[in-house]
Structures are given as C-alpha cells and as structure tokens.
Amino acid sequence: MFQILLLSAVTVAVQGDTVCYQELNDACYTNQPPWGNTEQRPFSILPDTPENVNTNFYLDTRSQKGLEVYFDDMNSLGSFNPNSMTRFIVHGYTDRANVAWMVDMSDALLAKENANVIRVGWFGGSGQVNYMSAAVDTQIVGTTAGIFIQNLMSKYGMSPDKFHCIGHSLGAHTCGYVGNTAPIGRITGLDPAGPYFTGTGSDVQLDSGDASFVDVIHSDAETLLSNGFVGLGIAEQSGNVDFWPNDGRQQPGCDQNALSTVIGLDGVASGARDFVACNHQRAVSFFTESINSPCFFESYPCLSYSQFEDGRCLECDGTGCPRMGFNAIDSESQINNDRVHTYLSTKAASPFCEYMSYIGIRLGTNSKSIDGSLYVTVYGDDAVTEQEQIGGSGTEFKLQPGGYYSDLVYYDYNPGPINYVKVLWDKQELNVGKDYITVDYVSLFVGAEQKTLTFCGDTSIQMKELTRYTIPLC
C-alpha cells in the first residue's frame, strides 16, 4: 500500500521496501538485496530521514575556517574558491565534523595548498547506538554531498577532477555514494569499514568505479574473529590501488589482545572501540602525515605480504613506485586500468614513514665457518642510519665461506647520497680470538631510488668480532 508521510514539510514517499526523499532530488533507497536481506546484511533497514541524519558541511580555507555552508544554498559559500581543489573529509561511526583528526587533516591540507576543505558531519546518523543503522544512513550523507557537488558544478562550471572525497571507515563508503551521485576525480578510502560491508559487492561498498581514481589505505583488516581479533576495516580490494601497510592488519605500536572485540553488530561494547581504534585510526594518521612529509611512503606492488617481506617485490616499473597517501594520485598513470595491491612497512610512532632497502652481504671464500650475526650501518651525505641486524633482532646464521645473507631493512630517515657502509659481526659462544670473516661485497637496493649500489670488500682483511669495518662504494 502506498503511503505519504509529511515530515517537516518535506515529502517522504514510502512504498513497500523503498523510501524516497524529495529534498534529495527524489533519491530512493531500498532494504532489499544487496542492501538488506542478505547473508552479509541480514536485517531490513531503510535509511533514516535526511533531517534525522543531519548532514552538515563546514568550509575551511586559508582565510576562513569552520564556516557552515549548505548543499542547497550556493550563496552560503563565503571564501570558497571554484578555481581551487575542493576536498571533502567524511568521518565514520561515532565521530563528528569537529573531531580532532578532521581538523588536523584540514590544517595539513591547507598548509599544502590553497584548497577548499569541506568537513562533512553527520552525527545524527553516526552517533546512533545501532551501528547497522549508521551504516545504512551513509547513503543519505553520500547523496547529500553528491548533490552539493552537482550544485557547485552547475554554479561555477567546475570539472569532476576538482573534487576529492577523503573518508574514514563508514566515511569511505560514504565517499563511494558521493561518487555514485556526482562524477568526481578522486576518492581516498581510509580503512573502509568492514562490518556490514564485507562481501556486499560494488553497489554497496566503496569500489574502483566510484571515481576516476580510487586509492585505499587498509590498516585494520584483520578478519572478523580471526585469531581472537576483530578488524574494523574491510579486507577486500576496494580501489584502483590498495595500500597494505604492515599487511594492513596489526600496526606497529597498536598492541592488542583477545579483548579487542565488538559485542554484536548493534553496538560497540563500552571501551572496546577505543581499545581497537588504534589500528583503525592509523590509516588516518598515515594520510595526514603524507600530506606534507618529505618521505613519500613508497610502496611495492606484490601478490602477498609474505613475498614482499622476502624481498621478491622491490622493483617498480620506470614510472616509480606507488606512493601511499596524499601523493597516491601520482600513481594514476602507473596503474592504468589495473587493480593493484601494494605493500610497505611503517614505524610504530610518528613520523611513520620509513626508507626501505634490501641489503645483501657476500662473504669471502676464505672466511671462517661461524655461527654468528651480521649488522650493517649506512653512511650518507645527510645522515648515518641506525645499525640494522640482518634477519632482524636475534637472528644468527651459519656463516659459511662464500655465503650470501640478505634482508629487507627499514630506516627512520633518508641518509641522502650513500658513500659507504660499515659491517660488524658477533657470535654467541666464547671468542678465543681465532675466528674472523671476510667480505667480498655488500649490495644495497635503495627502494626510494630504485637502484642498486655495490660496495666492494677486501677479502685480505680478516674482520674481527664486534668491530665495524668500512666497505666503500665500488
């Protein structure tokens, strides 16, 4: 039976399992598959009214911050500059438009460029106890923001490539709905939400078809209930390029245990969200840092994280390696129509970006046979790196004459043009002064520069334990 409801003088048409909202250009929504009544979405929930979701927009520019603007009033735009990039930032569950991370990201963007930054708030939807209802309400937010973009294009003649939507968690999928409403140049998904979106398909979840270019950072994609952990992010490919820092799961510095859990899909247990939010929020931190960082968060296309850790996926093509975060758009020409998975490592605390190198040491054929560990320090024009143990802390090799030992290592800072390396070794058992190694050469693949440096050893030098020996460039 067809029924007309009047809410605040706005016509809402409800028919069966569909609801339409006149103020959103008669946009209609359903709770039928794939939106509901599926294994992934077992409940039949329709989006709430736009009035209750209460989508708000706050414009930040270099000359004016925090101005509330309205999607249907082009006279409210204050210092909006149609010639500049317009970047929307959309939050997720329980957040608001003035949450610290959104303000910090906006400030970073404005420090980078003279942009229009529009913070999108929807606490009427995101603040609900029922997570599933909040997830469904993202459609209302996305449509509203999409109409805003349509109106801006109509008033100013702006092109789609002037618009970029950056969304965290539920906000990432919201950006997908923005792109379904208006053509936009780019979407950045920051750990798109997993619960109620995993396995739903491209109509429901963020997908590479939602903008000209879609880049995604996964930071909390641990499979639900796997190994006692709950991932709040989605573990599926979601963009043209998906970045998986630290395999996109457990982030360094976010130590957790089996108490990390969500109690039911209709809400989050008290205190649990804060406990698990470190991994989920880390994608935001990565992106914000990347805006103005001199380190570019280079990543490496690979079939799996284990292959990346083994050093099997370090070389990129001639156009360079995809850069995670703000500069990911530089990778658009590299990726073309492919959908790419890329991997990288980060530090446990800010600044998160690291410089990757792959180090190999070839011992001389006149070395002794010893059970020992190897260490390398890199010396450049700008800095000296920390000493790194080949194989990681506690690794001991059977050092053999002519043996080759290698490892993927990370440095906190860029040493600049590299002049030489220093090698040190030690062993666990008592040293009676007779053991030594010799080094034929050291190879160093510099990820950021995509080049290999070779340092020539002198096999006539018998290197004593716990002593650093200089190995110069060949």
Image (cartoon, grey):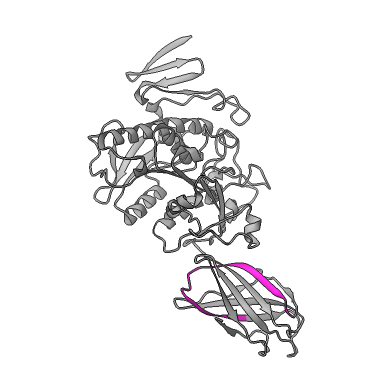
Nearest the viewer among 276 and 409 is 409
Numbered circles on residues, count: 0
Query: Magenta segment: does it hold 417?
Result: yes
| Residue 78 occupies quadrant | top left
What's the residue at 57%, 75% (across, down)? 387
What's the residue at 63%, 53% (across, down)? 304
Instruction: Give residue 314's position: percent from left, percent from top.
Output: 58, 62
The answer to whether residue 406 of the structure is visible from this angle is: yes
Quadrant including the C terminus: bottom right
The answer to whether residue 393 of the structure is visible from this angle is: no
Q: Which residues are magenta?
A: 402-423
The relative height of residue 433 versus residue 146 in the rendered view (above or below) is below
Task: Tell whether 50 sits left or right of 366.
Answer: left
What's the residue at 32%, 41% (across, down)? 58
Instruction: Give residue 38's position: percent from left, percent from top.
Output: 61, 27
Nearest the viewer among 92 and 374 is 374
Instruction: Give residue 191's position: percent from left, percent from top.
Output: 52, 46
Instruction: Give residue 76's position: percent from left, percent from top.
Output: 24, 36
Nearest the viewer among 54 and 153 is 153
Question: Residue furthest toward the front?
Answer: 318
The relative height of residue 450 versus residue 158 in the rendered view (above or below) is below
- Look at the magenta stretch and give its main secondary structure: strand
Task: Tell whether 91 sits left or right of 308.
Answer: left
| Residue 50 occupies quadrant | top left
Task: Tell whether 163 sits left or right of 250.
Answer: left
Query: Magenta segment: does it hold 26?
Result: no
